[in-house]
Image (spheres, rainbow, N blue to C red):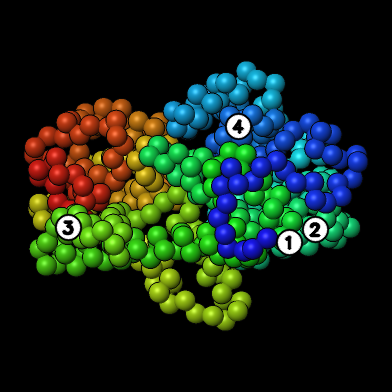
Amino acid sequence: MTTFESITRTDIGEPAESWDRPAATTATAFEYDVAIVGLGYVGLPTALAYHGADSRVLALDTSERRLAVIRSHEADLLEIDHARLLRALDHPGFVLSTDPGELRKAAAVIVCVPTPVDEHLIPDLSILRAACAMVVDHAVAGQVLMLTSTSYVGCTDDLLVKPLMERGYTVGTDVFVAFSAERIDPGNAAFDHDEVPRVVGGATAQCEEEASKLLLRYVTKVHRVRSLAAAEMTKLLENTFRAVNIALANEFADICKALDLNIADVVDAASTKPYGYMPFLPGPGVGGHCIPCDPHYLLWQLRKQRVAAPMITQAMVEIAARPNRVVDRAQEVLSGAGSGMLGTRVLVVGIAYKPDVADLRESPALEILDGLIERGATVAFFDEHFDSVRLPSGILLTGVTDPAAFEAELVVLHTRHADAPLGWIAPHQLVLDTTYRGTDVPQRVIL
Ligand SMILES: NC(=O)c1ccc[n+]([C@@H]2O[C@H](COP(=O)([O-])OP(=O)(O)OC[C@H]3O[C@@H](n4cnc5c(N)ncnc54)[C@H](O)[C@@H]3O)[C@@H](O)[C@H]2O)c1
């Protein structure tokens, strides 16, 4: 098999039985075609996509609470996935479970568990290590094991290949190991999950082959790379590229402000260039489980190699500092209006890390709320996706349901959900627009 090539579902034909699969574990002996480990923003849509493609799915999560949320249709999903879930929950080919012992009955296992960073921005691999150890413990001959969680280069080798070899398996003959990062964009219906090409790297050529077949059950295109490490690095490049460009967009926003220019107009104008430019918009910081975390996996591993990456480091510093910049600017806006922060009523609108998801992970809004409280403001938030929120400081804040009734002296626009109109903002209210896109609020000042 040549390397660095793309193949599509139609290229692949029927699975080739080019290796000696032990009789006791032939494909027909498996009860499930695929097991998905971790049913979060990535794993649940993946499980549903496989089920939609007629695979028998074991959907495994260690959290009973998460399974209850899924069973009661309260999971934060796109419409298409809600419809798939309705069908899946009524179907014997879709099994929800917390029992890792079931993994032995699956022909393939896909790991989709979180890879966060701790408060010192150090990768927290504990969840991934535990999930991979569980998969290795229950591995049986003939299985394809695939990691999809973003991590450092060499992670699949460390957490799956080596432990499997220690258990006596020959990887590439008895079991097949691959890495293929998820590229799903929760809350974004513009790109069909199944149509987004997947990059895959295997521990051996046969692993890559088996993993490609597994992916092509529901995605239309896979791009193969030479190794597990190349596939892992591809994901780190994608997300680091985004982080660096967001940091650059933030810097340009500050430059435009100093030169009395509108950054949104400038970005729109630059976007008319059909090549060599890709628009990134500034904002109050970045959230979610990818951009604020993934580049730190790379920086962390580079420290061991004594390799410096000053541009990435600086971008991550800028990104981390952005929420505090919002708090400083809020204070500046209030001072300009002749008031201080102490006792002032400040309402943060939209606290999810991005529009149209109910996801608070790493959301800059949390740090902004804490910063405003620390400086003495009386804060509240309005976001119909959340009743209350626990801030990093430990404070539990309950959201307002009637934003006008809060009578804020300053409104901070943080995230604008599609279904959240701003008609309640009174003309006399100060508005700090951290989205740079609130042109329908004439009195706004930008970050
Ligand atoms: N959310 C995104 O936008 C996105 C996009 C692309 C890639 N990713 C990557 O995908 C991975 C998963 O992210 P996510 O957002 O889906 O996470 P998540 O926090 O939404 O969900 C993870 C789920 O895994 C479960 N879990 C934890 N340990 C487990 C174990 N040992 N066995 C079974 N289940 C377990 C948790 O209970 C939880 O339900 C991360 O590495 C992330 O970087 C995320």
Residue indicated by mark 4: 53
Q: How far apart are labels 1 and 4 at the CA level?
A: 27 Å
The residue most toward the bottom is: 306
Q: Which residue carries the number 3 mark?
A: 269
Quarter of the image holding residue 156?
Answer: bottom right
- Front position in the image: 262 or 270: 270
- Label 2 is placed on what type of residue? Val
Alpha carbon separation for disc pair 3 and 4? 42 Å
Residue lying farthest right?
A: 23
Mark 1 near mark 2, Cβ–Cβ under 8 Å? yes
Is ligand 1 within 8 Å of the beta carbon of the residue shown at mark 1?
Answer: no
As helix, strand or loop, the secondary structure at mark 1 comes to loop
Local SS, label 2: loop
> Where residue 162 is drawn, which disc sits there?
none
In front of the other: 72 or 276:
276
Q: Which mark is residue 204?
A: 1
Q: Are marks 3 and 2 in contact (CB under 8 Å)?
A: no
Q: Dot 3: few (<14), some (14–19), or many (≥20) neighbours within 10 Å?
A: few
Residue at 61% x, 76% y: name it: 304
Q: Earlier in the sequence, mark 1 or mark 4?
A: 4
Q: Which mark is residue 171?
A: 2
The residue carrying pointer 1 sits among few (fewer than 14), some (14 to 19) or many (20 or more) residues within 10 Å by Cα, namely some
Q: CA distance from mark 3 to mark 1?
A: 47 Å
Task: Determine whether the beta carbon of the residue marked 4 sits less than 8 angstroms from the nearest atom of ligand 1.
Answer: no
Asked whether, in this view, residue 62 is left or right of residue 289, the answer is right
Q: Position of residue 174 (x, y in %)?
A: 84, 52
- In this figure, what is the number of numbered marks? 4
Nearer the N terminus, badge 3 or badge 1? 1
Viewport quadrant of the C terminus: bottom left
Q: Secondary structure at mark 4?
A: loop
Residue 301: image location, x then y, percent: 59, 71
Mark 4 vs mark 2: in front: 4
